[in-house]
Amino acid sequence: MDVAFLIDRTPSLSVGDLELEKGFVAELVGALNVSPDATHVGIIMFDKEGEVIADFKDESLYSKEALYELIERIPNFRRKPTRTDIALMTANNWLFTPEGGDRPKFPNALIILTDGKTNPVSKPSFEIIPLLKVSLRND
């Protein structure tokens, strides 16, 4: 499976909330079968931009221990605004592509962690969801 985590890092969440998000992602990683031939993990931190900090093709992240270390090193800085649409499009346009290491024979999953308050200028979800359905489908 290829699993993408989209993590909100905006000021609408406290630093403590960001730490909780990171801890939750680490717990989920602990439940996955991470290895070169099994689950690959991608992580996008988002605010006004989507920053890919781990993609599916990064062989150095094919172990739980490496992912735990990466998650622990995620800085706690936060900035405005919350652009959930940008995060979803970054996943669609980078992670779930051959360049991002997406594997066509493996199922895809996307988990987004946010307080749910996207910026008013964000594209509506009805424009983005159809694109993601194509990327996330099982071929």
Image (tube, helix red, strand yellow):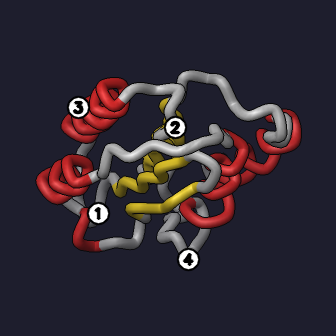
Q: Residues within 10 Å of mark 1 (few under 14, many from 20)?
A: few
Q: Earlier in the sequence, mark 3 or mark 2?
A: 2
Q: Secondary structure at mark 1?
A: loop
| Foreground residue among 70 and 47 | 47
Which quadrant of the structure image shows residue 91?
bottom right
Q: CA distance from mark 1 to mark 3?
A: 21 Å
Q: Nearer the viewer, mark 1 or mark 4?
A: 4
At label 4, the amino acid type is Glu
At label 2, the amino acid type is Thr
Q: Secondary structure at mark 4?
A: loop
Q: Residues within 10 Å of mark 2 (few under 14, many from 20)?
A: many
Q: Nearer the viewer, mark 1 or mark 2?
A: 2
Q: Which mark is on residue 49?
A: none
The residue under label 2 is 10
Q: CA distance from mark 4 to mark 3?
A: 27 Å
The residue under label 4 is 99
Whole-percent x and y of residue 108?
53, 48
Instruction: Decide if residue 21 is in sight here.
Output: yes
The residue under label 1 is 37
At label 3, the amino acid type is Glu
| Foreground residue among 130 and 93 | 93
Q: Nearer the viewer, mark 4 or mark 2?
A: 2
Instruction: Decide if residue 136 is in sight here.
Output: no
The residue under label 3 is 27
Q: Is 66 on the left or on the right of 58, as rendered?
A: left
Q: Earlier in the sequence, mark 1 or mark 2?
A: 2
- Residue in the image at 33% along x and 52% along y: 39
Q: CA distance from mark 1 to mark 2?
A: 34 Å
Query: Looking at the image, which residue sits at the far left?
Result: 65
Q: Nearer the viewer, mark 1 or mark 3?
A: 3
- Residue in the image at 42% along x and 55% along y: 42
